[in-house]
Image (cartoon, helix red, strand yellow):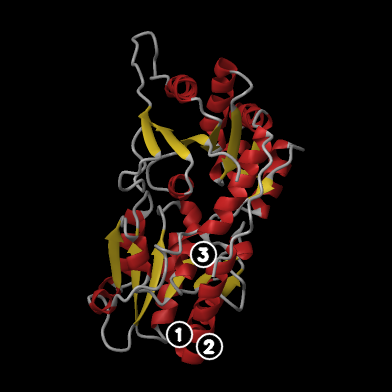
């Protein structure tokens, strides 16, 4: 067995798919005996209980009067270098290209080439930020100077190459779910708090941004409601929340729509749903669809970004062209009205989540990348996930 590693992890620690994946990965690596150092401006919200192999280092920003804005990027790079020296880190694994990959590059310049850097691209760091000409070269620098780069879908790899004209090898490492956390829960009593006899639950979870097409979510539900007694549960908050609340009221369906705000225990919440709605116009992976899949909940979504790599159309959900709410609603009705078909989809969801996107499988892939950039021979077996 190859030696245990000392790994620094930097991510956005608040709500968001990249922070969730980074934190969960760190916890799983710690369970395998690696020493994990989170270097962030606040404690990652999914970090949970104390673990002997996990350490947290807060990035503090000094607000000097000569700076118009606090220099977070420089403070982060300095903290990375400080932790790397003090704890003799083998590598830094940063999630999101900017500013984290650039900060890791600066830290490496301070520490020396023995410190390796791995960058994971998650989505908007490429699909949105890389289209900004003012920071495009910075993103390209961060990626090209990384010892390894990973991305969460083939679609994101393609878009990275197209937007940034990058030839550097990029490893495909899908997002994952911890099967010990995400599985069908018995939530009958919780479900009964929202539905009456015979009603179905459609759910949407996001940060309520325009890219999530919240209007489509409500339109799909309204069309389903005409044929199937149901409720819509909206989990999350964001800039489009007031607009959606107004739309729901104007359509006269406010008694059928429940706004649940942000929720930490996502597995319990998803387990009460019958369908997950994900009609996004951009989605580099679609972590919420995977979380739903692991809980046995099919997804009704769009053919956008990495969603087709995750949701198998006609097996674990249905995918339609972006904006085609009629087709999405019809697919939802088809599933909700055919119990036998629904159960087939449910079983397919559970099987695919456990075998293609399980925590052991993806964690082992990251370990192989770490040992590769460090030049260490390591035999990491392919886990059996079932």
On screen, residue 56 above or below 379: above
Residue ID at (49%, 85%):
343
Find the distance from the CA under tag 3 to the CA under tag 1: 18 Å
Residue ID at (49%, 46%):
29
Count of picture labels: 3
On screen, residue 376 above or below 379: above
Residue ID at (55%, 16%):
110
The image's mark for residue 276 is none
Disc with the residue nearer the chain's start (1 vs 2)? 1
Residue hosting label 1: 336
Give the camera-side residue of 184 and 241: 184
Residue density around tag 2, few if under 14, some if 14–19, many if 20 or more, within 10 Å: few
Disc with the residue nearer the chain's start (3 vs 1)? 3
Left or right of 312, for residue 216: left
Residue density around tag 1, few if under 14, some if 14–19, many if 20 or more, within 10 Å: many
Q: Nearer the viewer, mark 3 or mark 1?
A: 1
Can see residue 80? yes
Residue ID at (43%, 47%):
27
Can see residue 281? no
Identify the element where label 3 is drawn: loop
Q: Position of residue 336 (x, y in %)?
A: 45, 85
The image's mark for residue 341 is 2
Q: Nearer the viewer, mark 2 or mark 3?
A: 2
Identify the element where label 1 is drawn: helix
Q: Position of residue 300 (x, y in %)?
A: 51, 72
Find the distance from the CA under tag 1 to the CA under tag 2: 9 Å
Q: Are marks 1 and 2 in contact (CB under 8 Å)?
A: no
Residue hosting label 3: 279
Q: Position of residue 261 (x, y in %)?
A: 29, 57
């Amino acid at each position: 067995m190859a030696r245990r590693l000392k790994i620094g992890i930097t991510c956005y620690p608040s709500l968001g798919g990249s922070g969730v994946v980074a934190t969960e990965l760190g916890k799983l690596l710690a369970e395998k005996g690696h020493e994990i150092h989170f270097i962030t401006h606040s404690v990652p919200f999914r970090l949970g209980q104390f673990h002997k192999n996990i350490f947290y280092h807060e990035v503090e920003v000094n607000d000097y009067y000569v700076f118009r804005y606090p220099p977070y990027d420089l403070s982060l790079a300095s903290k990375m270098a400080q932790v790397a020296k003090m704890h003799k880190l083998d590598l830094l694994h940063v999630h999101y290209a900017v500013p984290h990959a650039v900060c890791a590059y600066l830290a490496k310049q301070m520490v020396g080439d023995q410190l390796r850097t791995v960058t994971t691209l998650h989505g908007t760091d490429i699909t949105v930020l890389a289209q900004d000409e003012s920071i495009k070269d910075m993103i390209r620098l961060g990626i090209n100077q990384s010892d390894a780069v990973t991305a969460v879908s083939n679609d994101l790899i393609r878009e990275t190459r197209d937007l940034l004209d990058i030839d550097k090898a990029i490893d495909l490492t899908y997002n994952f779910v911890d099967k010990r956390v995400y599985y069908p829960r018995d939530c009958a009593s919780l479900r009964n708090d929202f539905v009456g006899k015979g009603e179905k639950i459609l759910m949407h979870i996001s940060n309520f941004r325009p890219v999530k097409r919240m209007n489509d979510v409500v339109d799909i539900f309204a069309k389903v409601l005409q044929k199937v007694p149901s409720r819509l549960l909206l989990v999350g908050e964001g800039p489009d929340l007031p607009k959606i609340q107004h739309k729901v009221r104007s359509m006269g369906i406010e008694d059928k729509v429940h706004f649940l705000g942000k929720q930490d225990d996502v597995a319990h919440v998803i387990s009460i749903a019958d369908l997950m709605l994900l009609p996004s116009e951009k989605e580099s992976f679609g972590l919420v669809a995977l979380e739903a899949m692991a809980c046995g909940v099919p997804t009704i979504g769009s053919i956008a970004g990495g969603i087709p790599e995750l949701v198998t159309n006609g097996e674990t959900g249905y995918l339609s062209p972006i904006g085609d709410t009629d087709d999405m609603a019809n697919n939802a009705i088809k599933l909700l009205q055919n119990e036998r078909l629904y159960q087939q989809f449910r079983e397919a969801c559970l099987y695919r989540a456990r075998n293609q996107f399980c925590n052991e499988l993806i964690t082992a892939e990251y370990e192989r990348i770490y040992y590769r950039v460090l030049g260490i021979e390591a035999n990491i077996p392919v886990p059996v996930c079932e």
